[in-house]
Structure formats: structure tokens, C-alpha cells
Amino acid sequence: MFVRELNIPVRSIKGIGERKALKLCEAGIIDIAAVLTRFPKDYEDRSRSVPLIDYNKQRNICTVAQVIAHSTFRFKGELRTKIVIEDETARAVIPCFFKGDYLAKKLVVGDEYRISGHFERNKYGELQSTRIDFEEASITGASSKFGGILPVYYYSDNERNKLLRGTVLSALTLYANNIEDELPQEIIKSEALFSKSRALYALHFPQSMTELETARKTLVFEELFFLEIIVGRRRRRGAAPAQEYSASTTRTLQKKLESRLPFALTNGQRKAIDEINADIGCAVPMARLLQGDVGSGKTLVAFFAALAVIETGAQAALMAPTELLARQHAETAANLLEPLGLRVAFLTGNIKQTGRKPLLTALKNGEIDFIIGTHALFSRDVTYKKLALAIIDEQHRFGVTQRESILAKGNGVSLLMMSATPIPRTLAMTIFGDMDVSVIHDMPPGRKPVITHLARGENEMRVYEFVRDELNAGRQAYFVYPLIEQNDELALKDAESMQKRLSNEIFPQFSSELLHSRINEEEKRAIMRRFRLGETKILVATSVVEVGVDVPNASCMVIEHAERFGLSALHQLRGRVGRGTHQSYCFLIYAQKESIELAGTYAELLTNEERSREGKRLMVMLNETDGFAIAEEDLKFRGYGEITGTEQSGFMRLGIADPLRDLAALERARKLAFAILDEDPSLSLPQNSVIARVLQRSPPFLTA
């Protein structure tokens, strides 16, 4: 019997009547399976004594105290009861804010009680708790609620905690012994795990913290193991079609391109190119994720990959998320590859039919070697003669369906996905676990780290003065805002208004232009061309410049209302400067409000619970330049989000495992799952319990 097969109504448990069943239903618990898999959020260790005097050392007190008095106090103009207790170390009070003498009747003066609860000093200096659990000190043995480790399911609702504890205990007693193991027995033994039945018992009602840790380890490993089984099966299914075109062994075109470069490839670029060449040279189509920080040279690596298949007479396609970025890639490719004899083309949805038709004909006849564009590359009317390699830039901006439509344009098409938004290793192993990963860690020589500064909103003029010095030195600057136009409901600066102010009041001697998503593509292209040529000194924009804008002479990035941007967006925007040999700067201007406190060091900020979420994120940007470290922090702040290319809803909501926290277990589970699939690719998986839950909560591209 698996947990998911226990779809027996919760009313089957003795003592669960209509009222209690309704309370459980409100918490999403309708059957025994839901009871057993509603894991505790926390635990209260009542196995050891914590006296009142240690209230600030431990979260909860667990002590034997005597009631020494009942007194009264006024609350909202009415008298209320206050219980005064004392143990061997200190005195405390328990105020009763509600009418009635419930506690006064239960806590009798002169008697001793075991007491558990969170205590803190009130404004009068008294040690106080407003929510406690207690029992008479004379109660012992199985009847006692003390002496063990108590599961906590709801932090603020003692009644629901008590209800769930009793319900879970009854369900475990009735059904747990018959629950079968889902993990293979050899894995349970080799990993020193519990049986499923014992793990469930110990997770809800552990006898010790050591037993609790092993129980958690068991259920975490089980969940991650089956997740990796899904990923592994998808990897093997995707490797089924044979690749029709393999890379040339001479690498003639790649050698010619490298000889024409005015700089040397970095070690990271060379390693990535070698890995891609090895993949394309195999019979199985490549499925590789190329990661690299902003400015690490991923696009050039993609061009080398394209040359590997083009030299054999096949075609390559590169898809970018925006026309602005796609056009920039096309211009770069034309400059680098057309002198080698390659036929490069550009295609977007905005190309008129008169120009589109002959282009599509040439593509179908094999007269185009390398085509670059937006999602229009994979429209229904686009046909390739010999598509062998599909490259996706900024992969997280494309959905799963779009990626699948790419591979349908050829037989055994290799896939290279690029990301300038560094994907944490935990995500790369789960979401892109069916792909090999190449990482470019180094940067081109001569690049200097961007210096980042934080500035309060009222200090913006000091930032403007600094930027003015850079402009006078011949540099250029970006100013980025969260809104295109003024919004009366949001007290935020907008790009349109600020472009006028910067142009007329702050920097009248320097040319400036406005760029945002509502401007048509032709005008966007003209604006970017003028900025790239240095004709425009200041570019005022929204986050539309987050990707793809490469202007080496730009040395200043000013982001106003920086608290409104995510970490990944801030890192991408900062990466727009520092692309040349000049020292570059990024200014994060944040709103002056009480919720944002930025004093102190990064470590101090992260350990102070009263500091704001916005402040923490901005401090990450101040102290980190490594995109992968920033990505890990971003993941902690916002969870597993749209970095996967799917909506957040329903994604990665595992029952107990957390791939970020449980990285070591994830790596081990992956290794064992893939090894088992190597021996038996047709492995039959349990159709219920954990595997069912993972499949139900996962997006289509994770399903087995």
C-alpha cells in the first residue's frame, strides 16, 4: 500500500466528526493520504528543560513553574486576569485578554505545572507570554504532553495543532504499518534510510532529533530520487532520434574565424567550444545549456557551434527573445561570418511579405546557412532544408512549446540553449537535468569589474554630478526607470518624464533619447544605432535594455527605484556597462522610506530580521559581482520562478524536499537514478504516492 492509495475519507478515523472534519477540510486535508503527508512545519522540543531565565536564548521555554498569584489589569477599559508564575530561575506573567476566568480556573494558585511557550519582556519589563501550553506537574507517562518532541503544524493556532496531532497519530496507528516502500531496498540500505513506514512515524513524532533527521533524509531522498527518474527518462527519450548531420572533423571554418578575431578566446570559451564540438560529432543530437555571466562571450561560442554544422552543408538557426537583440546578433554574425563565405539572414515577424517570401524560399532551398531572428524562425510557413542546430538565446524567455516547435523543424536537431541569467546549479540539475551544461566562468581580458554604489533618492543630484564628469570625459550613460509614463497610483519616476527633465534641466548640454517597449521596432533600431555610434550620450529607458545592448563606451548605469527590480534584472542591467576598457559604474537609487534600511555590513543585514526584503536584495548587488552567486541569492528570495520558462504556479512544490537546501541529496539521488536507468531504461515506476504527486505538480516538460 502506497501513501497515495490511502484515499480513505478522514471521517473514518474514530473521533473525527463533522465539525473536526470541516476544520481539516479547510486546511486541505480530506483523506488519510493528505493527513500523513501534511508534514510538520516545525518542532517543539519538550524533551529537555529550558528555564524562564533562558527566554532570550531559546525560542520556547519548557519548565516546571508554580502559580504564585492571580492579579488583574485593564484591557480596553475592562478588568482582565493575569496569572503570575515562577520557576527556580525567574518570575513571569500570563495575561488573559479575553473575558472569562478560563486560565484562572485551570491554573490554581499554589499548584505546579509544566509550561511551554514563547516568553519576552513587555513594556513594563515583565517576562510575559500570551500563548502557552500546560499540564499539571503530577501527570506522567503516556498521558503527558511533555518529555518528547512535539510536531507543530500551524504556528498560531493551538487548536488546529492539537487536532492535527491527534488525527495524524490515529492515522499512523491505523495505516502506517501497511505502507510499502517505494525506493528500491538496495538504495534504502546503501543510503542508511528508514523504511517508508518508520520515516512517516519519525517525521511526525520523533523520539530524538537524530531520528527526525534520518526520517527527513529518507523522505527528501525519495522525492528527489523520483524527480530525477523523471528527468532521466526524459533525457533518454529526447536522445532517441538519430542526428543526420555530424560536425566536420577539420574545423576549417572555426579555425578561419578564430584567426580573424582581434582577441584571444578565453579558456572558458575554448572549453565550451570543445564540449559542443564533441556533442555535435556524436550520433545523438546535442542538448546543451551554455551558461555565462553578462559579457562572457556566449554569442561568439554559439557562432563557433553554428560553423561546426554549416561546414557539413547543414543549417543553423539562432532565436533571440526580442527583435533588438536578434538584429544585433545578425549584424555581428554578418561582420564575422560573411567574410568566411557564409550566407547569413535575418527574419522577424515585422518583415513584410515582399521581403519574407524570397527569404523563406532561399531557406527552404538551402541557400541560407545561418538564419537569426525571433520566434518567427519557427512559424508554420518556415521550412528548412537541412536544419541541424537550433540556438536559443536568453532561453528563460521562451516557453516549452516554443522550444519543442524548434526541434520539429528538422530530424535529430541539436539544441544549444544560452542563458546570461546564471541558473543556479540546483535549478540546472532539476529543470535542465536532461541537458549537459557548459559554463563560461572567465571574462574577456581587459574587462574591469563594475563598481556599484547605493544612493538614497534624495541624494540623486550627487549621482548626476558623477555622471556629468563621465559624460565630459567622453563616456555615455544609461538611466533606467520602472515605468514608461507617469502613474497617479504609483509614486514612481517614469522614463518619459525623466527624459524631459534630464534633457532640459540636468544635462542640457548632452544629447539624450528615450527607449521603451511601445516604440516601434524601426525607431528602436534607429535609437540604438545612434547610441551605439556615440551620437546620443544618454539613453533613458525601461528594462527593455536589460539584454542585448552592447555599447563599450557606456560607463554609467543609473537605475532609479532600484528596489522595484528583481536581482536578476539588476544584474542584467548592470551588465550593460563595463563592456569596454573604461572603468564603469552602476548606481542603484532607492526610495527613501522606512522599510528600506541599508546601514551596516551585508552579513549584519542578512541576520537582522527587521531589515527589509528590498534592502537585503540591494545589499546583495552591492557586495556581489558574480552572477551565479547573485542567482543563488535571487532563488532564495523568490523561490523557483519563471527562470524555468514556465509559470510559477504548480512548479516544484514538492512535499518535503527543497532542491536548494537539499543539494547534496539531489546530486546523490540523480547519480543513483541515472545509474538505475542505465541498467533498466524501461524501469517501472510506482504509479502512486510520491511519483504521482511530483507528476501532478510538475509542468509538462517534466512529465515522464
Image (cartoon, rainbow, N blue to C red):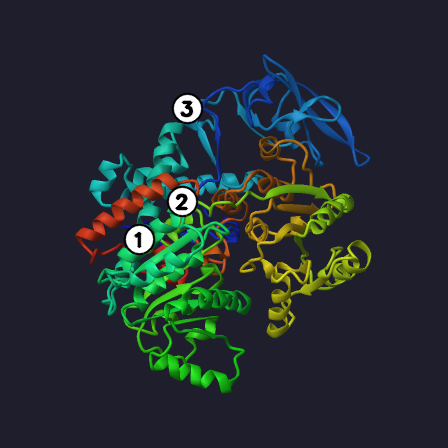
| Residue corresponding to mark 2 | 657
Three-letter residue code for mark 1: Glu
- Counting residues from the start of the chain, the first of labels 2 and 3 encountered is 3
| Residue corresponding to mark 3 | 141
Give the image quarter of residue 76.
top right
Q: What percent of the width, then of the height, locates residue 643? A: 48, 55
The crowd level at tag 1 (other Cα within 10 Å; few <14, some 14-19, many 20+) is: some
The numbered disc on residue 611 is none
Q: CA distance from mark 1 to mark 2?
A: 32 Å
Q: Residue furthest top?
A: 88
Q: What percent of the width, then of the height, locates residue 461? A: 78, 46
Q: Toward the viewer: 586 or 629?
A: 586
Which of the two marks, 1 or 2, is nearer to us in this view? 1
Q: Residue at x 29, y 53 (%)?
A: 229
| Residue corresponding to mark 1 | 275
Q: Is the C terminus in the top left, top right, bottom left or bottom right quadrant?
A: bottom left
In the rendered view, would you say 347 is above or below 87?
below
Three-letter residue code for mark 2: Ala
Disc 1 element: helix
Q: CA distance from mark 3 to mark 1?
A: 65 Å
